[in-house]
Amino acid sequence: MLKTSSSAEFKDLPPRSLLTVAEAADFFRVCPQTIYNWADRGILRTVKHGGARRVPVVEVMRIFSSTTTNSF
């Protein structure tokens, strides 16, 4: 279901607590619409910031950790 690149690492994340949808999509190597879909299904928590959706870095770490410990 959720696939991450083996080269995706947390050190590659921007040094801030909120990512844009595009940045989160780049990290997971999916299209931005997938990030919106995950948020709508409750898979990934997002927050509204200035009228735009943002993805907390802790959510990216949670999803990434769950995909590396579980096989989908």
Image (cartoon, rainbow, N blue to C red):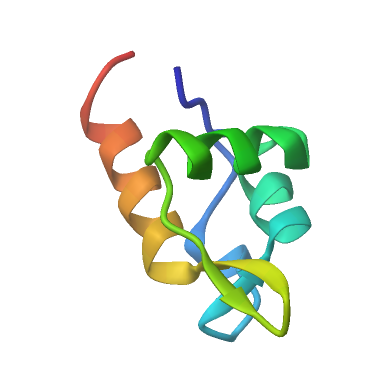
Please give the name of the residue rendered at 22% of the width and 32% of the height, measured from the top-left corner.
69
Residue 6 versus residue 64 in the image, above or below: above
How far across and down, in percent of the image, does residue 8 sit? 57, 47
Residue 36 versus residue 31 in the image, above or below: below
How far across and down, in percent of the image, does residue 46 sit? 50, 61
Image quarter where the N terminus lies is: top left
Image quarter where the C terminus lies is: top left
Q: Nearer the viewer, residue 41 or 13?
A: 41
Is 30 situated left or right of 42 in this image? right
How far across and down, in percent of the image, does residue 10 sit? 49, 63
Residue sitting at the far left: 69
Please give the name of the residue rendered at 47% of the width and 69% of the height, measured from the top-left corner.
57
Please give the name of the residue rendered at 45% of the width and 56% of the height, measured from the top-left corner.
60
Please give the name of the residue rendered at 30% of the width and 46% of the height, measured from the top-left corner.
65
Is 40 situated left or right of 29 in this image? left
Q: Quadrant of residue 29?
A: top right
Q: Nearer the viewer, residue 6 or 33?
A: 33
Total marks placed: 0
Q: Quadrant of residue 33?
A: top right
Q: Quadrant of residue 36?
A: top right
